Amino acid sequence: MSSPPDLKPPADATAVDVQPSPGRSRWWRMARPDWVTPGLITWTRWVAIIGWAITFAGKCHLDGIPYFRSDLLMWMGIGLAAASIGKRAIWTVVVDFLPFVIVLIVYDYLRGISDTLGMPTWWHPQNDVDKFMFGGVQPTVWLQEHFKYPTVQWWDVVATLIYVSFFFLPYVTAAVLWLRSRAEFRQWAGRFVALSFLGFGLFALIPAAPPWAAARCTAAEVANHPSNPTCMAFNPSWVRSGGMLGQVTDQRAGAHPYIERLSGRGFSELHLKFASAVIRAGQGGADQVAAVPSLHAGGTMLFVVFFWRRSRAWVRAILAAYAVLMGLVLAYQAEHYISDVLAGWLCAFAVAAAFGFFERRRKRVKPVVTLDEPPHAPAPTASRMENPCPPIATTPSST
C-alpha cells in the first residue's frame, strides 16, 4: 500500500502569523519598577482618597460647601485624580474635564451679558400664561399664601435643599459617570453643555423677568420692557399692591403679606448661614432676567431623561418626583413661573432627543460588506483562478 499523499500548501500561499501581538506601545507609558506592586498601588490610592476626603471635609467645616462652580470643579478634579491612581491615567482627568470647565466658564460669562444686548424684556407673557393654565390663579401667589408661615417649616428646608441640589447635580453626575465610563461621561457632558448654551441663546433673545421681580414692579414701571428697572431693587415690603402678581390676601397668620424670594430660607434651620449668604451674593451678580427657560428645571429633567432607561421602576418614580418637586419649589420660591419650568423641560427633551438620534445613527453606521478582497490579501494567480481546487495526486496501489 502506498504512503499517504504529501499535502503541502501552494507555493504562493501566504503564511499567517497566529501569535498574539503585544499591545501597542504608548510613548507616555513608563516601565513600572518591580517594587511597585498592585497592593502598594491600591494602598496609595486609598490613602490619597482618604486624605482628599478629610481635607475637603475640613474645608466645608470652615468655609461651607463650595458653591461657586470653579471651586466645586477644582475639588472634584482633585478627588477624581486620587481615585484614578492605578486605575486610569491621571492626566485623563485634565483631558476630559478641562474642555468641560472652559465651556462652562465661557457660558457663565455669556450668561452675564445676555441682559445687555438691548432686547426688550418680557414682563407680562409668562405671568399671563400661568394664570391662563390655572384658571386665573397665579401659582406663585397661591403657593406662598398656603405654604409660607412666619417661621421656617420643614418643607422650607426640603425646598431649599431641592433648589440647591441643581448647583451640584450636573458635576457630581459627571464625576460618577467618569469613574464608571468615559463614554457615558462624554454623553452627559455633551448634553448638559448643549442645554446650557441653548438656555443662553434664549436668555439673549427673550430676556424675561422672574416672579419675584414682577412682584416688586407695576405695569407702568416696566411699560418700556426694561431689563433692570429701579423697582427690582425695592424691598418687597414697600410694594403694597403686590406689583404685577397682585396682592397676597389669604396668607397664613403672621406671614408677610407680599411675595418673597424664598430660595435660601431653609438654610437657617440647617445652620448654614454662610451658604445662604453666598446664594444671595450669587443671585445678585447673575443675570436677573434670565428666567426663560428655567435651567434649574431643564437640567433636572435632563438628568431624569438621561437615567430613565438605566433605572428600575422604583428609581424612575423617584426621578419623576424630583423633577416635579423642582418645578413646584421654583414657583413657590418665586424664582420661576410654571411656564418657565415647562420651557426648561421642553429644552431638555429637545437636547436629549437630538443627542439620542445622532448616537443611534452612529451605532447603525457599519462597514459595507462587499465581495472584494481586503487590501492586505494577496491577489489570486491565474492558475488558481482557472483551477482553484487542484486534485491531489495519488499513486495506484499494488494488488
Image (spheres, rainbow, N blue to C red):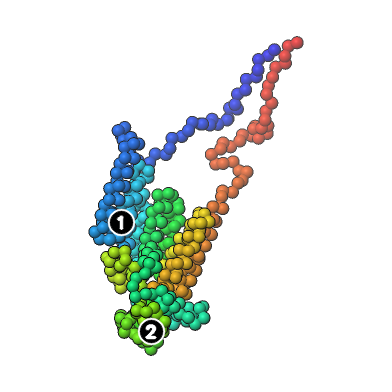
Q: Earlier in the sequence, mark 1 or mark 2?
A: 1
Q: Nearer the viewer, residue 214 or 193?
A: 214
- Under mark 1, the amino acid is Met
Q: Position of residue 229 (x, y in %)?
A: 33, 82
Residue 309 seen in the figure: no
Residue at (35% x, 42% y) in the render: 86
The spot of residue 369 in percent (x, y) is 60, 46
Where 17 falls versus 45 (above or below)?
above
- Give me the residue at 41% from left, 71% from top: 330
For marks 1 and 2, give the CA distance: 43 Å
Which x, y percent locates residue 387? 68, 32
Residue found at the far front of this picture: 253
Q: Residues within 10 Å of mark 1 (few under 14, many from 20)?
A: few
The residue located at (34%, 63%) in the rendering is 105
Q: Is residue 362 above or below residue 68?
A: above
Q: Quadrant of the C terminus?
A: top right
Label 2, on which residue?
242
Does the residue at mark 1 contact the one at mark 2 (Cβ under 8 Å)? Answer: no
Quadrant where the N terminus sits is top right
Residues packed near mark 2 inside 10 Å, few (<14), some (14 to 19) or many (20 plus): many
The residue under label 2 is which amino acid type? Gly
Residue at x-position 65% and y-position 15%? 3
Question: Is 55 on the left or on the right of 355, as rendered?
Answer: left
Extreme top residue here? Answer: 399
User: Residue 253, can we see it?
Assistant: yes
Give the numbered dot on residue 74: 1
Name the residue nearer the viewer: 269 or 294: 269
Q: Position of residue 52 (x, y in %)?
A: 29, 50
Q: Which mark is residue 372?
A: none
